[in-house]
Structures are given as C-alpha cells and as structure tokens.
Amino acid sequence: MNLRSTMLTAAVLSTLIATTAPAAISAPEPAAATAESRARLAPLVDLAAERLLLADEVAAAKYGTGTPIEDPRREQQVLDTVADLSTSSGLDPAVGIRFFQDQIEAGKDVQRGLHERWNAHPELRPAHRPDLGQEVRPRLDRISVEAVRELRATEPVRSPTTRCQMDLAASVLGTVAEHRLDALHGEALGDALSNVCR
C-alpha cells in the first residue's frame, strides 16, 4: 500500500472504532487476539471487498457507452432478491436490505471514481469491456447469497458493542492489506460496512 492508502485505511479504521471505549483500546491486543477478532467478521468483510472489486468490471462495462451508473431497476431486483434470501435464511429482511443498500451505494462510488480516473488518464482505461449479464452479474448474485448467509451467521457478534467495532476494524485492516485496496476502494469499503455493527 502507498502512503495515501495507508492514511485512508487509518481514517476508515478510526471511523469504524469511533464508538469504542478508550479503556478498550489503551493497549494493543496480542497477535492471537487480533487474529481471532479478524476471523469473526472476515468472511463478511471479504465478500464486501470482493463485491467492490467487481464494481471495477461494472465500470468497465459501462464506460464510454452512455449507460448510466445509476440503475434503479437492477438495484431493486437485487434488494428484492436479498429480501427473499434473508427471509428464507432466518435473517430480518430489513438487515439484509440495509447491508446491500450500503453495498450498492459503495459500488456506485467506485464506478464514479474509476470513470473520473479514466477520463483524466486515458492510458488507464480498461482494454476489455465485460459482459454484465454473462460475466459479472452471476458473480454478484453468488456474493449476495453468501453475504446473506454470513449476515445470519454473524448476528451474535454484530451487536453495536465495542467488541463488534474492534472485530470489524481488525477485519477491514486485514482485508485492505490482503486485497491491496487503493484509496478509492478502501474508502468505499468503509462506507459499505458502516452499518455492520448496528
């Protein structure tokens, strides 16, 4: 990660643990405890990161075609599917919908950021235009199924407590490093996870 990404990550983590009690963060946790914290929410955080990275392909598919980034019809289809998946898995549909609303908005932020970047730097424009229906949406749909499953599985550790904030911060830090997310994706990941501990 470059300096800007490192600073961005620090800002994201600061936001995520803003409600953490000072006594709880006065001393660093042992490595084993940090690894345990990351493990609790890592699968959910990794799925959010994977979805954001797929936003790159969505952006590439739309770039230069006149296709708008906003797609209310598709977004509603996703939310309707998530509501059904949530109900069948025993998750409150409102929780699933809220989580995916955050994912959708974060994904659009990535698309906008990439379009601006490609406009300013033509040499960075993607050489391949993915097929949304055949290449991208099936992978997004898979993530939806897995994310709803993880939301249900992590209900006991996602209450708005210091522990959840610390677990989330540890998971985000590990995921940003693992996927080498730049500032655009790192900030979007923070937004995508802003309601996880609520």
Image (spheres, grey):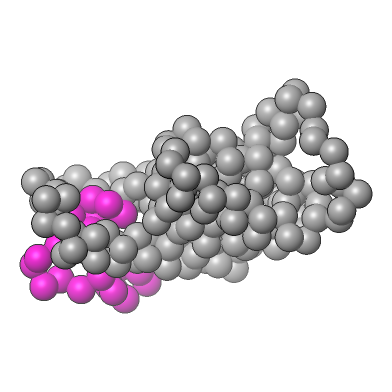
User: Which picture quadrant has residue 45?
Assistant: top right
Query: Could you tell me which quadrant the C terminus lies in?
Result: bottom right
Query: Residue 85 versus residue 166: which sits nearer the camera?
Result: 166
Residue 35 in the image: above or below residue 65? above
Residue 19 visible in the picture: yes
Where residue 57 sits: x, y (%)?
23, 50
Q: Is residue 26 above or below residue 60?
A: above
The structure residue drawn at horizontal position 78% and vertical position 61%, both measured from the top left corner, is 19
Q: Nearer the viewer, residue 126 or 75?
A: 126
Give the left or right position of residue 40, taking residue 1 as reference: right
The residue at the point 47 percent across, 33 percent down is 178
Residue 30 as seen in the image, left or right of residue 86: right
Q: Kindly report the secondary structure that dominates the magenta region of the rendered protein.
A: helix
Which of the 4 image quarters holds residue 1? Answer: top left
The verdict on residue 146 being magenta is: no
The residue at the far front in this view is 3
Task: Say which quarter of the image contains residue 81.
Answer: bottom left
Can you give x and y, in whole percent of width and height, for residue 120 in the image?
18, 63
Q: Residue at x 71, y 36 (%)?
A: 37
Could you tell me if residue 137 is visible in this image? Answer: no
Residue that extends furthest to the right in the rendered view of this protein: 23
Question: Horizontally, is 173 left or right of 159 in the view?
Answer: left
Q: Disc count in the image?
A: 0
Task: Residue at 56% x, 36% y: name it.
Answer: 174
| Residue at the outermost top position | 32
Q: Where residue 136 appears, x then y in whole percent?
A: 24, 49
Residue 82 in the figure: left or right of residue 11: left
**Residue 118: % across, % down:** 18, 59
Q: Which residues are magenta?
A: 55-77
Magenta-drawn stretch contains 59: yes
